[in-house]
Every structure is written in C-alpha cells, then in structure tokens.
Amino acid sequence: MPQENKREISLPMALVPVFFLIAALSTYILVLKLEDLPVIPIIIGIVVAAVVAAFHGFSWNFLEKSMIHGITLAMNAVLILMSIGSLIGTWMLGGVVPSMIYYGLQLLSPSIFLVAALLICSIVSLGTGSSWSTAGTVGVALIAIGGGLGIPLPMVAGAVISGAYFGDKMSPLSDTTNLAPAVAGTDLFTHIGHMVYTTAPGYIIALVLYGLLGLQFSGEHIDTASLQNIFGVLEGNFAINPILLLAPVVVIAMVVLKIPALPAIITGSALGGVFAMVFQSRSLAEVINAAYDYSKFFSIDTGSEQLDSLLNNGGIVGMMETIALIICALSFGGIMERTGMLKTMAAALLKRAKSTGSLVATTIFSCIAMNIVAAEQYMAIVIPGRMYKEAYDERGLHPKNLSRALEDSATLTSPLIPWNTCGAFMAATLGVSPLLYLPWAFVNLSNPIISIIYGYTGFTMDKVEEVAGSADTEESDDGPPAA
C-alpha cells in the first residue's frame, strides 16, 4: 500500500490519539464505571487518529484502507474465536466443562490448598480459555473455602489469578492467545509452543512457593458446604463422567501434533456435540442452538451468580463483543501504523534498545505501561505489537519472540492493575484488591522477568531461518496489498 502522507507526523502529534484514547478509556472505566468492553472509547481513538492523519495530508481513502489492513490481521483470530464460541457452547451442553470443574475440585486437600487452587484454576482455564470465567466460578468457591481455613485471602486470590491466567495465556481457546500471534505475524501453535519456555519455569516457581506457603496450613480442615453445593448443582444438571474429559484431551493432542487451530477446535466442538447427545440425551437441534448461542436457549439457576455466568455461557454470539473490540482496536492500530505514528513513537523508544535484551525489555515495559495507562489488555497487545514488529524483523528475530513477549507482559500483568478492566473484574469477583494479591500472583510476576532474562542471555530467542523466512513472507499478517 503506497504511503500518501504529505508531512511527517511529529512525536507530539503522534501521541495525541494515544492521549485521547487513554482519556476516553479512563472516563469509560473510572468515571462512568461502565462494565461492557470499551468499544466506544476505542472508536473515539480511531476518530482522533484519523483527524490527526488527515491534518497531515492523508486521504480518507488511504485511512480506510489502513483500517481494513489492520482488520485483516485479526481475520484468522476472528474465525478461531467464532469456532471457540461454538466449542464452549457444545462443551457446556455436553457436560465437558462441568466435568472438568467437578473432578478438578476433587484435588482439594487442606495441606496443599494453595497448590490445589493453582492446579484447579489452571485446569478450568485451559479448558475454557477464560480467566474471567475461571475466577468467577471455581475462584469464588476457593476464596470462600480458603477464608474458612484461615488462609489469608490475598494468598488464595494470588493462586487463583496465577492459575486463571496460566490457562488464559496457554489455552488455544483464549482470545489473547489468538490475538498476540496475529499481531506479531506468527501462527497460534508456534506461539503456544514458544511460550512454554517462559511459562513452565514460572509455573514451577509458583508451585514451589505455594507449596512452601501451604505447609503452615497443614492439618486444617475444609468446610465442605460450598463444595457440596457445587457438586450437587453439577450432578443435578449434568451426567458427570470421566469419559467427557476426552474432549479437551483430543484438542490438546491435536495441538501437540501441530494440526492447525481451526480444524482442532472444530473437531473439539463436534466431539462436544456428540457427548451432549450420548451422555446428556440432548437433540441435534439443541446442540446446534448451544453452538450458536448457549445462553439464549439454555439456563441453569444455581443460586450463585458467578457459577451461573460460566454454566450459562458459550456459543458464537457470545464472542461477538470481543470480536468487535478486536476489530476496532486493530482499526486504530492500522491507522497509527500506516500513517507512521507508531513508527515515530517506536523510534523514540527504540533509541536506547541497542541489543536483543533491551528490545525485549522495552517491549515488556511498554506493554505494562499500556496496561496501566490504557487500562485494557487488548490495547496492550495490539499497540506495542505493531510498534515493535519491524524492529524484531530487522534483527532477524522470529515473530514468535515478539508474540511471547506480548503475552508474558500484556496478558499477565493486566489483572495486577486495579483500574485495568481485568484488575477491576478480579477485585469485584474475588473481593480482594489487586494491590493486595499482587505479591502472591507468582505466575504473573515471574513471567515478565524470565522473558527479559531470556532476551539478554539469548536463550530461546530464535532467528528466522532462510526457508522459514520465505514462508513467513508469503504468509505475512500484513495481508495482500490494497486494491
């Protein structure tokens, strides 16, 4: 796409859309206290970015094509998200997710409560791809049980957050896990595989620390009333069966075998539908309804708003709000990138990034700063991702290094900031301020540090090979030239 700018956009002018975006998001979240995804504030940012670009000589035709270019970066993620919505719907109807919750809760033991909390939340979030749903269901139960045991609630919340965001980061069903590689220019399974190098050590550190902390609670007894209530609801509404756990096993196996994400997810969705008909005695029409919009056709009243939010969730329609946010965010990024505003900001930030390590560190801190000022993890992925993509390419670094850095920072630090949408949700759901559970969220704290260490040591910082480089060029997320 040819550049049409008449004048180079200076750094102060390039920052104007960012400042307006921050102001709009802050007003939306902190002043108006609106709880929906902040699509409108991002649209305001798009308008301001377009005005600034037009002032510097960019035509509307160019800006429109820039937005379309930005949106094309997310098309693969959008298709996957729609498939994920279908999968969650059929897994709910088929009893797959309820069975995961049921058997996960069986791991509870007083002497290893914090470790169990981490494992349970990890299992559920890996299966659903949603940190919010995990925290809003088993997280709430774990908070109640931990309080009854006398375990400090910030510790329990830290373990819940660590497990929930481990799955949010590593599950192929997660929206951020699909968005990060789309922005960076790599594929989903390559991205997940590369994240293992930073996530596994952080997870092991968390297991050890929670195990050590849990020793002081050995010998305590769990008040099982909350658990029995959940078990009763699950058994009363679903046929719980260990065979149902084959659905996530099949999807994970396909991931390991590097089968493309879309076929793997669609297979998992179909398997959930089969389980719904075989084990839950549901009709084909009900399976189709669940895949499209689960909450419209099915409703379970457990008496717990948090548990209902998960058990009444799923379907393609449920993903549309997230898709709208992603499309708007990438439209904003498309204008900022194609008009050179991101490049101007990146140049200012990259002046001190003289090595691979400093480049990774700059990426990490930029994502954290975006989580703080923009209060939205999607923006913390999209904006730095587009800003630094060229710098990683120039150093010959594989795009998976960038996508990993984005997730190690943007995804994992979002619940640690009280005014971020994720931090606000977790505080309201778990009843613990992010500032209190922050020191105990070991997975979230360790990953950015490990990522920076890898950057400076060069460990797992893979280069683009010649053959891979040719393939990446052909399949670049830059998309086809505009007509």
Image (cartoon, rainbow, N blue to C red):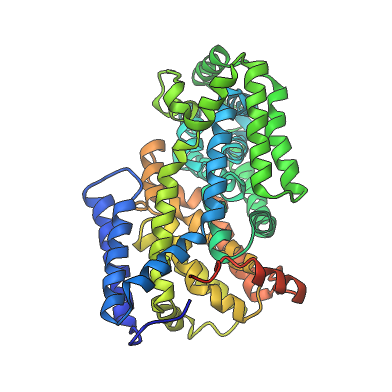
- As drawn, 288 above or below 235: below
Name the residue at 77% across, 73% down: 467
Q: Nearer the viewer, residue 167 or 85?
A: 85
- Image x and y of residue 211, in percent: 64, 42
On the question of residue 314 being in view, the answer is no
Whether 224 is drawn above or below 171: the answer is above
User: Which residue: 48% across, 36% down?
Assistant: 133
Q: Position of residue 188 (x, y in %)?
A: 63, 55
Q: Nearer the viewer, residue 88 or 67?
A: 67
The residue depicted at 50 percent of the width and 42 percent of the height is 131
Asked if one can make out residue 296 in the rendered structure from this viewpoint, the answer is yes
Nearer to the camera, 473 or 172: 473
Residue located farthest toward the left when viewing the structure as drawn? 31
- Name the side, left or right, on which 338 lies relative to 40: right
Label total for image:
0
- Spot the residue most to the front: 483
Residue 412 versus residue 52 in the image, above or below: above
Residue for point 38% across, 73% down? 62
**On the picture, is 332 further left or further right than 286?**
left
- In front of the other: 61 or 71: 61
Q: Is 264 displayed left or right of 41 in the figure?
A: right
Q: Vertically, is 104 above or below 228?
A: below
Q: In which image quadrant can residue 207 be found?
A: top right
Where residue 397 appears, as percent x and y from the top left, is 65, 74
x and y percentages locating residue 337 in the rendered image: 43, 73
162 relative to 370 in the view: left or right:
right
